[in-house]
Image (spheres, coloured by chain):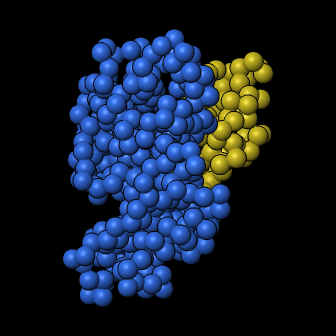
Amino acid sequence: MIANYGYKDGSGEFFIRIDTDKCDGCGKCVDVCSSGVLEVRENDFDPLEEKMIAAVTEEHRKKIKYSCAPCKPSKGYTTLPCVEACTKDAIIHSW
Amino acid sequence: MEKEYWKWKEYNWKDEDIDWKTGDIISAGVDVGSVSSQAVIMVDGKLFAYSNMRTGSDSPESARKAMDWALENTGLQLKDIQYVVGTGYGRVNVPFANRTITEIACHARGANFMYGPTIRTIIDMGGQDCKAIHCDERGKVTNFLMNDKCAAGTGRGMEVFADLLSVPIEDVGRMSFEVDEEPEPVSSTCVVFAKSEATGLLRKGWHKNKVLAAYCSAMAHRIVTLLERIGVEKDFCITGGIAKNIGVVKRLQKELGVDILETTYDTQIAGALGAALFAKALIEKSRK
């Protein structure tokens, strides 16, 4: 499953896309995120399957433009820590 | 008292032909949304009874009321239901639920039941948000996107418009086609902006049907932009209250160039129906 967390508003589209088929719930992305945007939890979207996957926390879903800002290019980063940390290439940022 | 045009009809329903006493699995789903709440009771995976009403300021109370109303005259009591799944915006506030499941999973499952296994794309147009969901032939979510940051182009927006123009909400869709020519969409679906724009158009002498047409088409256009990210795959359907508004549905169909499937079920119960189906699956799983 492709899970798109985030929103689109007047200033642009801000989505973190997690491919839950690739994600194995290792939690490396959670460890490197300085804003606490990510967490490993049960797959909410497939309640009959018991698999742990990475997800954007409820708290950050409506403000990821700001939550993710510390890692974005204007702050000197060229690659995103969460994307880098993911050995399965399961995370993509839309902006 | 002044008439409140936005108020849609609350009701409950039950299937007289089903005797729940002969049923093996009795499951229920409660969907507490931002605007409406539904409770669905199923007997062995068949739709037995449901209710559809407005959510009050107190979510647990709304959940309880919806459930009581669905149970009304069925002879069934809450304790007879083996498993209850709560879903929707207020799902954590369903006091009698055995567990909660996100509305995205529930809508996919519910749409799969209502429209059949060929459904691949579902747009849930709820009271305060809009979700685009892709699913497989079993109703399992494969991709989703939600835009829950603002209530633009949602059911609540339509209610505000119905009230502003003194048009009963059920008539909005039909009346929006009673125009000489299709107007340009209003420039914003933002409820507040659109409302002031509509007031301006009315002052300019526009007939209210034309204003409705402009708003319905703006709403249809917003769904198209939401779909851009995840794409449209046939078959396509809409769940939630807006599916009852042909003014939006037909315009969306035209803009997308894809047929929108119709159903005999009430599109507002999709979430609660999916929750009840999950409840059934969870009972079966625990018996294994």
Above or below: residue B26 compared with residue B5: below
- Report whether residue A2 is seen: no
Q: Which residue is drawn at 48% across and 35% down?
A: B166
Give the position of the C terminus of chain A as an image quadrant: top right
Q: Is residue B279 left or right of residue B198?
A: left
Q: Which residue is drawn at 52% across and 56% down?
A: B54
Q: Which lettered chain is shown in blue?
A: B
Residue A34 screen position, x and y as percent? 77, 39
Above or below: residue A86 compared with residue B225: below
Q: Which lettered chain is shown in yellow?
A: A
Choose between B105 and B5: the one closer to the eye.
Answer: B5
Quadrant location of residue B169? top left
Choose between B16 and B78: the one closer to the eye.
Answer: B16
Above or below: residue A39 compared with residue B223: below
Residue A56 screen position, x and y as percent? 62, 45
Q: Which residue is drawn at 52% across and 45% down?
A: B3
Q: Is residue B13 left or right of residue B53?
A: left
Residue A43 screen position, x and y as percent? 52, 56
Above or below: residue B172 compared with residue A72: below
